[in-house]
Amino acid sequence: MLDSKLLRTDTAGVARNLARRGFALDLVAFAALEERRKQVQIEADRLRAERNATAKAVGMAKGKGEDASALLKRGEELTGLLGSAESALNAVQAEADVWVLGLPNLLDASVPEGRDESANLEVRRHGTPRSFEFTPLDHADLGQRLGLDFEAAARISGARFAVLRGGLARLHRALAQFMLDLHTSEHGYQEIYAPYLVSAAALEGTGQLPKFEQDLFALKGERELYLIPTAEVPVTNLVREQILAPEQLPMRYVAHTPCFRSEAGAAGKDTRGMIRQHQFDKVELVHIVKPADSYAALEQLTSHAEEVLKRLELPYRVLALCAGDIGFGSAKTYDLEVWLPGQGKYREISSCSNCEAFQARRMQARWRNPETGKPEPVHTLNGSGIAVGRAMVAVLENYQNADGSVTVPAALRPYMGGLEVLRPGP
RNA sequence: GGAGAGAUGGCCGAGUGGUCGAAGGCGCACCCCUGCUAAGGGUGUAAGGGUCAAAAGCCCUUCGAGGGUUCGAAUCCCUCUCUCUCCGCCA
């Protein structure tokens, strides 16, 4: 959510910034709505003030034993007027809320111009793609003989699910454990176990609702609950409706959770393999920081995600997403892309974003700024550190051998009971 | 799943229809007193929103949430959520 004061005082500036994303802010409609809201609210406040004063006067008159019938009559009138004024206010307010909640975040000045992913800016590269003396397979072919079973998953759940067996299941677990250990013991994160089912309010806080409901899995039943699309939702919402002391910041959290996405808009994309699934695991990093520190924190968080790839010795590159490709709630995002020999290209494996105060305002997550003495929104950041399923894909493809076996990266061997090579089963 | 109790400010806790945003205490901040320590006295101490260029001021909202009764609701009625206790079941 944008700062409503800024939206009102610098509407043109906001519109210019949002235009970089390709988002057209309708200035005329906004001005009209705002004008209407102002009038209706002033009128409702006025009526309520008079109603309160009248009611108080009734009490005093009765206390003194005076006749209050004129006041009672006026009170009745006011209650009627106030009722309609309030419903008018609620209507305008609801309209304004939907409007404001649908606006994406402002972009940081450093975000490159551009309309789609082709304009993303490569910031740096690490590692060199290995040259193969044989034609590398993609993970789906390779994995089939190692225990990657899409057919079984289809029978159980349908398309876009995977079953992992044996060594592959363990490799998957090893990756998650390795990442958690790295972030908790070397990068200073607190590990979090959080709910996988969350309320609509939590999703509104991090920005998935109201706009992106079609990407979520909602539960049937009386309770309005959704499966989390990322641990960002429960973990960032840890600070919702809180006023934090400056000493509590920064907070750094890491959580390993499954993520559930309906990917409604991605039909036909990446249908092969386990690149795009309805369910996948991710190790997520979240920072809650003072506003002045958030861009330093973004660099730091990104470097923590990169460290995972470095230790796994996987070649990757870092992209600064361009204006048109950046996510709804983010002011600036770096994507990490890992090299996949099977596809012969770099593919997204992590996305690290500074949401500034966008989510904090929606969640009412604040800190007490000692300089002003006032509660002010914190800044929130999140990033994958990293996607477990895609990391496994990258390991399989980059570490494959001519005979269809896969060498276990050195960093993972302690988590695999010392196993050095995953071999195809019979 | 069954039975019961509860939800008030940073915390504890009073308040069952009127001048209550809410007594009292604790905590915290500042000041005074006391040559240290201990004790004492005073003042202040919520969040959100509107108006305003901004501040001050003024106004509105908020006593778990939503609805209702009433001129007026922390207080009465209904629904829901959450917490606690006991029983049952359960990983």
Image (cartoon, coloured by chain):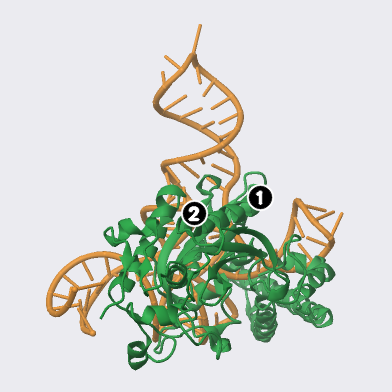
Chain colours: A green, B orange
Q: Is residue B79 above or below residue A337?
A: below
A124 on left or right of A228: right
Mark 2 crowd level (few <14, some 14–19, many ≥20, 10 Å Cα): many
Identify which residue, A270 or A8, lies in the foreground.
Answer: A270
Residue at (54% x, 88% y) in the render = A264
In three-dimensional space, the C-alpha distance between marks 2 and 1, rounded to whole angstroms, equals 16 Å
Identify which residue, A352 or A413, lies in the foreground.
Answer: A413
Q: Secondary structure at mark 2?
A: strand
Locate residue A318, reporting x and y percent: 62, 62
Q: Which mark is residue A252?
A: 2
Locate the N terminus of chain A by quadrant. bottom right
Q: Could you tell which of marks 2 and 1 lies nearer the N-terminus?
A: 2
Mark 1 crowd level (few <14, some 14–19, many ≥20, 10 Å Cα): few
Is residue A353 among the parts visible in the rendering?
no
Residue at (36% x, 63% y) in the render = A408
Q: How many marks?
A: 2
Identify which residue, B64 or A425, lies in the foreground.
Answer: A425
Locate residue A332, reporting x and y percent: 67, 63
Residue at (39% x, 66% y) in the render = A194
The three-letter amino acid code for the residue at tag 2 is Arg
Q: Secondary structure at mark 1?
A: helix
Locate residue A329, reporting x and y percent: 63, 70
Q: Which quadrant would residue A396 be assigned to in this image?
A: bottom left
The three-letter amino acid code for the residue at tag 1 is Ala
Locate the C terminus of chain A by quadrant. bottom left
Q: Which quadrant would residue A422 be assigned to in this image?
A: bottom left
Q: Which residue is mark 1?
A: A292
Callout 2: chain: A
Identify which residue, B87 or A193, lies in the foreground.
Answer: A193
